[in-house]
Image (cartoon, helix red, strand yellow):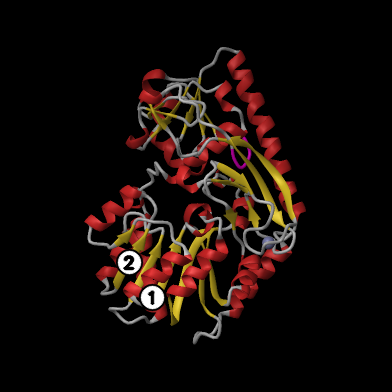
Amino acid sequence: MTEAYRRRTTCRMCGSPRLDIVMRCEPTPCGDHYLPAARAGEVQPCYPMDVAICLDCALVQLPDVVNPELLYREYIYNTSISLGLSEHFDRYAARLADWTGAAPGSLVLDIGSNDGTLLRSFKARGFAVLGVDPARDQARRANAAGVPTENAFFTEALARELRTARGAAAIVTANNVFANVDDLPDLVAGIRAMLAPDGVFTFETGYVVDLVRHSVIDNFYHEHLSYFSVLPLERFFQAAGMELIDVEHVETKGGSLRGMVQLAGGPRRANREAIDRMAAAERDGGFDRPDTYRAFAARMDEVRRDLRQRLLEAKARGETIAGYGASVGVTTLLYYWGLDEVLSYLVDDNPARHGLLTPGHQLPVLPSTVLAERRPDWVVLLAWRYADPIMRRHEAYRQAGGRFLIPLPAVREP
Ligand SMILES: [Zn+2]
């Protein structure tokens, strides 16, 4: 891919041309490309962000693909500084080692291994480990920490080289990367090439059912190309010569789906009870049908109208408004709601974001301590899923007359 962006006309999972657009988010720049102040004024192009469902396999997806070289070039997200995730990965490694019964010394491959956090847990349990990650800094950090890591995108061609060099893998993992890959058939061909005959592939990825039920529209952004559910996944693996053998619903990142897969005809017995239960719940909830997503889009339109009306009125009264949160998903919200018209600045608790400008709109991001000094009349909690801890931390701001607004799942002043 040489162009900055292209639009698919076929489903990235089953190849069907029957993609039905069910929701249109506003086009945004790369959502994570917060700019240093020295680059103020730089033009950041916007790319479309329509949401489609495949009428054949029911995969929810963004047909708009931003060139990954462009998207991940300046990737600043770092696993080990995300609170809670290290413990999560450590428990995950323990459970996987136990569940697969893979012998210590056998190889664990992690795709999208970031700075090697998950692999360090496997290494501590006596496994040989290998990471693959396209972000230069992350791969460098992982190698320095003793986790051998290829700085590359995982493809079938790379998998064949790695298989020759390192042998087959007992476990292949991909956490929160399965959604980020456009060429899913190639990814799975690579996994198949790496797996030992009795090996397992496990993945964790956002669950579209949770996104809709909990109104997590900030999970729509260009890195996330697919929004998974059990129904399309089962069919996809089957077509690729593999078998989905277990699924689990977990609470991380607003709701995720964890799946385990083996080569077709592999030695493990599928947990049909768990798979069939989740698939049936998806069918009953209409998550394989476009009208369910159109209804969701209509509900999100109402939130947008309500929020904009309140904030435009406040601004017309001369009140000042700040936003709380400066994540990749916040970019989606800022554009979808047109908040550049009303917000003076954002605040965030991550020091790495302080002093940066938001993608495209270039609103300044400041430390959250400025709320006590500047006392904006309103703070819109863009990081709305963390509303409770944020409000507790800034009780003094509220005591002094400041007001919070929580935008989702419906606009409310707490
Ligand atoms: Zn499809």
Residue 156 x/y as whole percent: 47, 66
Q: In which quarter of the image is residue 210?
A: bottom right
The amino acid beneath tag 2 is Leu
Residue at numbered disc 1: 169
Q: Which of marks 1 and 2 is nearer the N terminus?
A: 2
Residue assigned mark 2: 130
Q: Does the magenta stretch include residue 105?
A: no
How far apart, in angstroms, are the residues tagged by discs 1 and 2?
9 Å
Residue drawn 25% across and 74% down?
126
- Which region shows up in magenta? 408-412
CB within 8 Å, label 1 to label 2:
yes
Q: Residue furthest front?
A: 2
Residue found at x 64% / y 19%: 313
Q: Quadrant of residue 139?
A: bottom left
Q: Quadrant of ligand 1?
A: bottom right
Q: Which of 287 and 175 is in front in this view?
A: 175
Outermost residue toward the right in this view = 291
